[in-house]
Image (cartoon, rainbow, N blue to C red):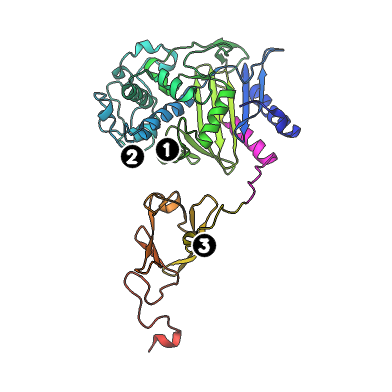
Amino acid sequence: MTSSPEELLPSTRRALSHRIARAQAEGRAPSLVAAVAREGRMVWTGARSCMEGHAPDADTQYRIGSITKTFTAVLVLRLRDEGLLDLNDPLEKHLPGTGVGEVTIAQLLGHSAGLRAEAPAPWWERTPGSLRPELADVLGERPVVHPAGRRHHYSNPGFTLLGSLVEAVRGASWEEVLRREVLEPLSMGRTSAQPVAPHAGGWAVHPWADVMLPEPVEDLGLMAPAGQLWSTAADLCRFAVFLSEGDERVLSAESVRELRTPAVPPEAGERNGGYGLGTQLVWREDRALVGHTGSLPGFVAGLWVSVEEDVAAVVLANVTSGPYAGVVAAELIGIVAEAEPRMPEPWRPLPEAEPELLALTGPWYWGTQPYALKWSSDRGLELTLLRGGGRGSRFVVRPDGDWRGLDGYYAGETLRVVRRPDGSVSHLDLGSFVFTRQPYEPGDAVPGGVDARGWLGLGDVGE
């Protein structure tokens, strides 16, 4: 990925620069760096600093806090894809003796395991990880505070457990596995567990005076998988592209889609988002965003991707509290998406027509409800309701010839083409629901049968 600022219009670049200038000034951040990626590469970067003549660039490291959790989630899904574990496995199956009961790996990834939010005192973000040398020191005496699977409750110790799970299954440190399996394949050479120059220093700014105080930089030890990493705007743009498209060297596009799929509902009172598997999901200005925010003493970070609009943004600042990095990153996406909307791909016909699939297209009826079945250019089928809202879905063919639902009401359900003895299509079976070519046609395979009198007018009803 290379920086190509010329690819954005001058007015767009000016608007992006203005937004981060406001963020740095209003948030009183010693420095702030931001970047935007589009169409698979970084297309803009900018920075502001309180130092005259000196500002960070897209290669300057900042601490990214909880964005680290998304990296840890990627490692866990790699284990799943290799068949080394199932997300529904109890953690204890692979990491015995934790004392968290039957919580599953999926529940830990989606923060629904019911674990406490933080490690016991002292404040883990501002103290060395050596104070918590064992998992029991991270979890404390009463690690479970809610019934597993009942609610979303954000848990930093939960991702410590996931990092330890990676180490137990791989037989190597979390840091080593991350470098080998994610950072190197994605060319993220400036992302590391420890700071590597050039890097920003962390600062706290007094709430009522324009003075600063340096923040300590601690190695988080066992808590590292929840928030240890340092990275750059350029590296995080690469990671953002991965979260949008996948990369077969790391995770397939299908598995990355799973990361982005809501795993649990939002917390009570939270109306603007949910949580996937190690990813935060939010809506900003009617725009769906996926990514994560992060903070540690001295640093705030935000990374969001609009998959639909193919735009991502990263914001990093070296201040404990100041600019809302996640909000600014979302607004940078909005600036680009609204000023320079994505060009749709040209329509192209399929490489060849397949008569059997073509014969399935057109109107179908669930009872009397009209649906349409379309054959799309990605060789999938799409079922849509023709009147009003309804239960539509996209389907992809399975090796056995049936079709699997990808989204909507029928996600994961099976669409089966049922044929007569002569090979002609009788009906569609979708999770036991029958779709026929005509609404309640006598002789069709309608469960319960069709009244022999057929359709009746008002004068026929009384006969």
Pick whichever of labels 2 and 3 is earlier in the sequence: 2
Residue 334 lies in what quarter of the image?
top right
Say which residue appears at 36% left-offset and 21% top-offset.
Answer: 119
Relative to the observer, which residue lies in front, 207 or 417?
Answer: 417
The residue tagged with tag 2: helix, strand or loop?
loop
Relative to the observer, which residue lies in front, 214 or 205?
Answer: 214
Residue type at numbered disc 1: Glu
The answer to whether one can see residue 290 in this image is no
Residue placed under numbered mark 1 in the picture: 267
Q: Is residue 339 magenta?
A: yes
Comparing labels 3 and 1, the label whose residue is closer to the camera: 3
Residue 323 lies in what quarter of the image?
top right
The residue tagged with tag 1: helix, strand or loop?
loop
Q: Residue 287, position in %: x, y?
A: 57, 42
The residue tagged with tag 3: helix, strand or loop?
loop
Mark 2 to mark 3 CA distance (whole Å): 33 Å
Tell whether 301 sits left or right of 43: left
Comparing labels 2 and 3, the label whose residue is closer to the camera: 3
Quadrant of the drawing holding the N terminus? top right
- When the figure is inspected, residue 200 is found, relative to residue 463, above or below; the finding is above
How crowded pointer 3 is (Cα within 10 Å; few <14, some 14-19, many 20+) is rated as: few
Q: Which segment did they paint magenta?
A: 327-347
Q: How many marks?
A: 3
Q: Is residue 5 magenta?
A: no
Mark 2 to mark 1 CA distance (whole Å): 11 Å
Pick whichever of labels 2 and 1 is earlier in the sequence: 2
- When the figure is inspected, residue 84 is found, relative to residue 33, above or below; the finding is below
